Image (cartoon, rainbow, N blue to C red):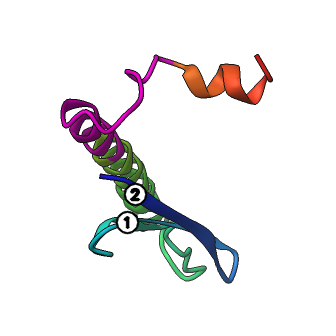
């Protein structure tokens, strides 16, 4: 099952949306949390923990989607660890 990945900005906050290409259903939606200037130090620390949790959840979901594609035979080859680094370097 192929996926359509959309990225963009809402104001200055990055967003990511991954949709099933055939059905159009949203599989992962993520937006970088906005920062309120009126938050206390404790609230800012809690927000940082939530932000880290959201990022970990995003990567967990992306891993599960890739694993699902691999197990269904929808990928040409098994994804290699760090493969994107080699592509970025032009190797």
Relative depth, front residue between 6 and 53: 6
Say whether residue 74 is visible: yes
> Which residue is label 1 attached to?
21
Count residues near mark 1 (Cα–Cα under 10 Å), then give few for <14, some for 14-19, many for 20+.
Answer: few
Query: Which disc, if any, is residue 3?
Result: 2
Q: How many marks?
A: 2
Kindly identify the residue that appears in the image at 37 percent across and 53 percent down.
Answer: 2
Kindly identify the residue that appears in the image at 42 percent across and 24 percent down.
Answer: 79
Does the segment drawn in magenta span residue 36? no
Relative height, residue 31 to residue 84 (above, below): below
Relative depth, front residue between 75 and 60: 75
Kindly identify the residue that appears in the image at 37 percent across and 34 percent down.
Answer: 75
Which residue range is magenta in the image?
Answer: 62-81
Residue 82: x and y in percent read 54, 20
Which of the 4 quarters of the picture holds residue 77? top left
Say whether residue 14 is visible: no
Tell whether label 1 touches label 2 (CB within 8 Å): yes
Does the segment drawn in magenta span residue 68? yes
């Amino acid at each position: 099952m192929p996926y359509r990945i959309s990225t963009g900005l809402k104001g200055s906050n990055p967003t990511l949306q991954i949709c099933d290409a055939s059905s159009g259903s949203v599989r992962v939606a993520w937006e970088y949390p906005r920062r309120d200037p009126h938050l206390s130090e404790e609230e800012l620390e809690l927000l940082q923990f939530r932000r880290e949790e959201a990022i970990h959840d995003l990567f967990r979901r992306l891993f599960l989607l890739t694993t699902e594609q691999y197990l269904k035979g929808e990928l040409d080859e098994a994804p290699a660890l760090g493969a994107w680094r080699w592509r970025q370097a032009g190797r």
